[in-house]
Amino acid sequence: MSRSPIRPLAAAVAALAAALLATPIAGQGAAQATRSGPMAVISDTVDEVLAVLNDASLSSQERRSRIEKIAYRRFDFVTTSRLVVASYWKRFSAAQQEDLVREFKAFLARTYGDRIDRYNQEQIEIVGERQEPRGDVSVLTRIVGGEYDAAEVDYRLRGKDGQWRIIDVKIEGISLVLNYRDQFKAVLSRGGPDGLLEALRKKNVDATANQS
């Protein structure tokens, strides 16, 4: 059987999961965050996730479902999807763009969701923020404890309509957007938008089947 053209990066996935599922601790510059600013968005997101993880009444599937809802609210999946496919975005029809956002969101949720039960009381230190082009802001964090101790994870946020939402995550200098752009480019060059959508749907269907 041929290998799937879309492959998750195991180390990056694990590090990202550890960062999202970590206990926040005060870091340099963290006290400067306002409750509506980029650093506050990251800190509040981690607090929400931690509350779910520490709720002993929830099953593994319930935890995953609730954490997915948090991620869906905090991430701008439309912008992330557009950045991932880059110039190919214009080749997608409006309906295909909606399909891409939906399938890519489900793909990421399933890729990272199976690591929820591996949470082992890691912490995350918010160390500051950095201004980026286009008015974006990156919130700089560091994992404390666990297998990925001291790993640097940066969350890039973009403000729109008074809200800051995550559009990219960079793990030890490796961008989630650029990683998937490289993977999807090969699929798009061979099969165009239909080819990528088919590959994502197959990944999501296979993942659902494996969970049942």
Image (cartoon, rainbow, N blue to C red):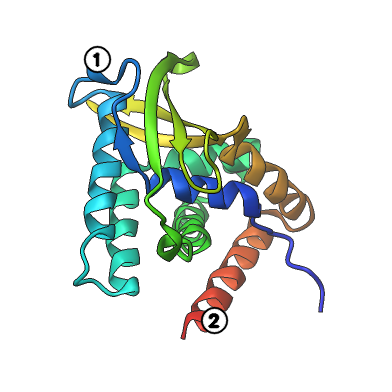
Question: Residue flagged by tag 1: what amino acid is it?
Answer: Gln
User: Which mark, by number, is residue 159?
Assistant: none
Say which quadrant the N terminus sits in. Answer: bottom right
Q: Residue furthest right?
A: 2
SS under mark 1: helix
Q: Which residue is mark 2?
A: 210
Residue 69, x across and y down, in percent: 29, 57
From this viewpoint, is residue 92 visible?
Answer: no
The residue that appears at 71% across and 43% down in the rendered structure is 182
Which one is closest to the eye, mark 1 or mark 2?
1
Residue 88, x across and y down, in percent: 64, 42
Q: Which one is in front, 64 or 179?
A: 64
Residue 66 image-quadrant placement? bottom left
How far apart, in angstroms, are the residues tagged by discs 1 and 2? Answer: 45 Å
User: Which mark, by number, is residue 32?
Assistant: 1
Residue 25, x across and y down, in percent: 30, 32
Q: Earlier in the sequence, mark 1 or mark 2?
A: 1
Residue 130 image-quadrant placement? top left
Residue 159, x across and y down, in percent: 32, 25
The residue that appears at 32% across and 15% down in the rendered structure is 29
Q: Residue furthest front?
A: 145
The residue that appears at 56% across and 51% down in the rendered structure is 13
Q: Which one is in front, 121 or 132?
A: 121
Q: Which one is in front, 17 or 71?
A: 17
From this viewpoint, is residue 128 visible?
Answer: yes
Question: Residue flagged by tag 2: what amino acid is it?
Answer: Asn
Crowding near pointer 1: few (<14 within 10 Å), some, many (20+)? few
Left-right relation of 97 to 28: right
Residue 155 image-quadrant placement? top left
